[in-house]
Structure formats: C-alpha cells, structure tokens
Amino acid sequence: MHYSHTHLLLNYKHISLSSIQQGKVTPESDFEKASIDFINRWLNKQQVFILQTSGSTGTPKKIEVRREQLIASATATIKALGLKENDQALICLSTQYIAGIMMLVRCLVGNFNITAVEPTSNPLGQLPAVAEFDFAALVPYQAETICSEMGVDELKRIKKIIVGGAPVSERLMETLRKATSDIYQTYGMTETLSHIALQKISGVNPDKAFKALPGINLGVDERNCLVIKTDYLPEAIITNDVVEMLDSNSFQWLGRADNVINSGGIKLYPEKIEKAIELVFTSLLINNPFFISGLPDAKLGDKVSLIIESKNKIEEEALLQGLRRHLQKHEIPRSILYTDAFEMTPTGKVNRKATLQKLLSGS
C-alpha cells in the first residue's frame, strides 16, 4: 500500500514526505514531533505500534497493535463514510493519542491530501477562509467553539465531520442539526483502534442510535455493557458502557457502568440526567460546566449530587424548579456542590473521580 502524495501541509509549511522518511525534518512543537514521528515510522514500514489507552475499559495502559489492524480500522471508516483517493483531509487533533493517530492512518491508507494544524479550540479560525476539506475529525469542544465564534454555517467548509472523544451535548446536537455537512458522532476507544460505530447527527433526519461499521459484531454482557468483536481485534472488547441494543448492529448509549448511581435501590445513569440538566441550564443562560455523581448517603446508599464548576453559587431555586419539570423525582439532585476548577484528564475530559476527591478533601 503506497502513499502517492509527495508533500503534506504541516502548520502551514509544505514538507516533503521523503524528508520525513529520511528523518531530516526538525519539529517545532510537540504536535509536529508526534505527527512527523508517526509518519516516519509508517513510511518506513514499521509493523508494531504502542498506543496509550485512556482507561475506557479499565486501568490506563499501553497496548501493542499491528500495522494491519490499524489499516483494517482505517479502511472500515473510509468505506463507511464514502471517502475517496485525493480527498482533502484536515487533522487538528493531538497525534499523540488514538484520535489523531487514526486520522494520520486514514490519510496514509486512503491516499488523502493532508493538512495538519496545531490543535486549538477553533481550528477553522486559524485557516484561510478559502480552505475547504472533504473530511475532518473534531472533539465536541472544537465543534462548539467553531459554531459559537464563526456560526454553524462555517462547518460547510468540511463536507464530512466525525465528532468524538466525549459525548456530544444536547445543546451542541441541536446546533449541529442545522449544519449542511454530514456530521457523525463516534463511539470507540483506543482498545478498538478508534470508533467502531457512527451516529449521523446533522440534517433533518438524524440517526436515533449508533450503527456499527461493517464487520463489527456487537453484544452485551450481564451488566448490559457493550461487547465488541471484529476480525482485526485479537479478542472481544468488554466495555464499561451500558447500552440499550435496538437490533444486532445498533444501540443507544446510556452511560458508564462505573458512574452508575444506586440510590435507594434504583439504578440511575448520570449521563442521562445530565442531558436533562443541560436543557435547564440553557434555558436559564447558565454556561458553567457540571456533572452528576453519587455521594454517600446513610439512608439512600448514594444520593444524586450536582457538581458545578463555579466560584460563586448560582440561583439554586430557579434551577431546582427547572429540574423538577425535566427530571423524575428520584433523579433530582439532593445536593449541589461547587468547585473553582474541574480536574481534567490528559485527553481533555473531566476527571470526575479526581474532581470529587479534591472537592471532598477541601483541597
């Protein structure tokens, strides 16, 4: 499999593939170093790669994957999205982690033209207004920033967009429905070599559920957590994601098993409650980040608690009135806690456990 293009555009610099292959390019940032290093190893036919997991299926660890596995995953995405040779691809995610690495692999396997720019909250804002692309991957924060700073119409500069790394909020979902681009929410993790399912979220008839890519077999375990099997993975991946299977290849994501709250014998999914709370926050013009967690309670076992990133208290009575209209009685938070800043993971997600530890310890 040969990558036929001779150059790529890296942070606005035209760089020859031959100079990368020969190790003659001096990177000027961590992003450039990671991108150049991976491309060098790929062009020089490296067969085994080491990836760092984020802990989606357990403790974060390094895993070893083979070149043909990465090719199989990339090929599945290319086919599912109908991408073709010589398409213009934008890479604006960190290439130290699986999302950015797989964008590089898709480009090299699919023979796309590569434009790679330093990851920022608004990647389109740093590019010429005439720059257009056939394909890009964004995290929700980037999609949200583009829409708020430039307008959702600006996304038409990218024909097909995959959004992943974290769940797409209800507010952002509503905005992206107005986009003319084909936009898909992804489901996947490092262990599955990026996404194994897509959900179209743009247009007038968005998908109601995730649909598995061709060649992916889905099931659930006794916890109703998703189990993934495919030819390019050596064994089944047992996730910690609780799902509702709609048929053999589509599912709705309910939340993380390790986040489930058992309150008075009722299992509650924080991610589901958070979607309703987000609607209330939007109606009250509250923009603070938040999450739901279960905190110890002598009577209930765990009580539903709302954690808000804020230096000051918000108007709680108005908030609770809104929550009573959108949540069932047992889902309404019994306590509201505030912290100046959430703890974050290296990949930019809220670290719920570390944030709670910091909050409860008073540090």
Image (cartoon, rainbow, N blue to C red):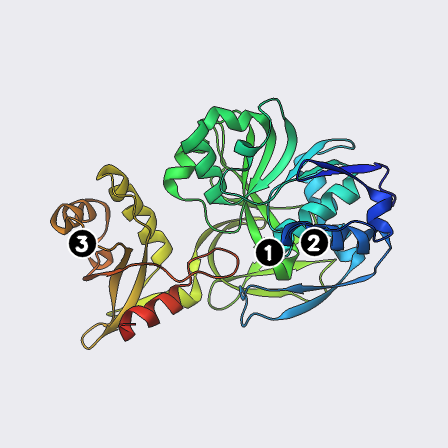
- In the rendered image, which quarter is residue 114 located in? top right
Q: Amino acid at mark 2?
A: Lys
Residue 274, position as x, y percentages in the image: 33, 51
Q: Quadrant of the N terminus?
A: top right
Q: Amino acid at mark 3?
A: Lys
Give left or right: position of 152 versus 235: left
Pointer 1 residue:
218
From this view, report whether residue 222 is shown above or below residue 189: below
Q: Are marks 1 and 3 in contact (CB under 8 Å)?
A: no
Q: Residue at x 35, y 52 (%)?
A: 272
Depth-wise, is mark 1 or mark 3 nearer the camera? 3
Q: Secondary structure at mark 3?
A: loop
Pointer 2 residue:
33
Depth-wise, is mark 2 or mark 1 nearer the camera? 2
Q: Secondary structure at mark 2?
A: helix
Observer-nearest of 211 and 283: 283
From this view, report whether residue 281 is shown above or below residue 149: below
Identify the disc placed on residue 187. none
